[in-house]
Amino acid sequence: MDAIVGLLGGPRAQGAFLLRSVLIPPWSIRVEDQAPLTVVAMVRGDGWVVPDEGASVRLRPGDVAVVRGPDPYTVSDDPSTTPQVVIHPGQLCTAPDGQKLPEMQELGVRTWGNSPHGTTTLLTGTYTMQGEVSQRLLSALPPLLVVPGESWDSPLVPLLATEVVKDDPGQEAVLDRLLDLLLIAALREWFARHRAQAPAWYRAHSDPVVGRALRMLHNDPAQPWTVASLAARTGVSRAALARRFTELVGEPPMSYLTEWRLTLAADLLRDPDNTVGAVAQQVGYGSSFALSTAFKRVRGISPREHRLAAHA
């Protein structure tokens, strides 16, 4: 199982905000939407991502930027261009003074900009809810990372650019999955290129012993794993596995398993059709009471409170 998808369960966009922007300089968009994670892909032309803190980064065709919220940032043709648009929570767009946007107009399906003949085209995909991307992923990322288009051979940016302007039946689901794929592919490429900055649990996947243990935990979290059973399946002693796992991952195997199970449970609980008892069985707890106890001990709230908060 892939290190990103296996460890994180994969991002799950649900009706994500997706927009194609067609622009002619000068242009500058201030983003204050407080979204947990945003993907910006440059299709044509150049631009810059300008965080409030840290260095500005240039985007060229094919480049993909991943921005971790909730801190604001600006996307513009040049770092010196004054913002003309502000994107607020809920994807409400206004001029900097709060008024309507005379410069911007609808240019088609999921498309807007300041000119239908703009020399710059960029795609923006925003994960609008915390539950769509696990905290384990968010905490592993820098505030801003960029994967250069020249460093990877991926068809996902042009494919998303083609699909985002369609209005076919089921198109929202298609776009959600394409956004997930683009994010996962970009992160995998970035982690591979910046291995020293990758989180410990990602690097540990390449270890022949700990990597195998991680894959077993992720493939079958409902299994009643113990350090002894993991050690037997990986061909080392319990002490050796516990020591090596803790050294590479940063926590003991059973602590990691608990967090992984509860991460899966948190995602599953967002579906109102999943009962607490059914979720408990899927993630390795014998009863709804056992899951509720562990969930509240680790996360500070009950599964029911978590579900209510996710749908608030």
Image (cartoon, rainbow, N blue to C red):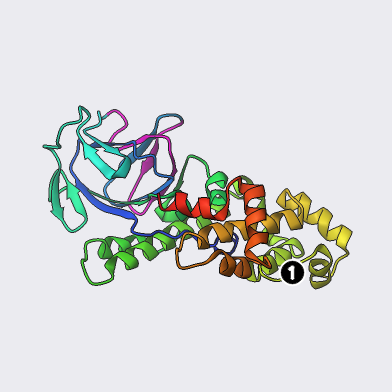
Looking at the picture, tell me which residue is in the foreground, 160 or 129. Answer: 129
Drawn side of residue 298 relative to residue 111, left or right: right
Q: Position of residue 97 (x, y in %)?
A: 20, 27
Q: Position of residue 35 (x, y in %)?
A: 39, 44
Give the quadrant of the N terminus.
bottom right
- The kind of residue on which mark 1 rests is Pro
Q: Residue at image x 14%, y 50%?
A: 106
Q: Residue at image x 81%, y 63%?
A: 227
Drawn side of residue 9 relative to residue 155, left or right: right
Q: Residue at image x 33%, y 68%?
A: 174
Q: Position of residue 266 (x, y in %)?
A: 54, 57
Q: Residue at image x 42%, y 61%?
A: 180
Q: How many marks?
A: 1
Which secondary structure, mark 1? loop
Looking at the picture, tell me which residue is in the foreground, 67 or 65. Answer: 67
Q: Is residue 94 magenta?
A: no
- Range of residues picked out in magenta: 54-80
Q: Position of residue 68 (x, y in %)?
A: 45, 43
Drawn side of residue 91 relative to residue 271, left or right: left
The answer to whether any part of residue 1 appears in the image is no
Residue extending farthest to the front is: 289
Q: Is residue 77 magenta?
A: yes
The answer to whether any part of residue 307 appears in the image is yes
List the residue tagged with mark 1: 224
Task: Relative to 278, say whether 15 is above or below.
Answer: above
Q: Residues within 10 Å of mark 1 (few under 14, many from 20)?
A: few
Task: Relative to 198, say whether 86 is above or below.
Answer: above
- Give residue 290's quadrant in the image: bottom right
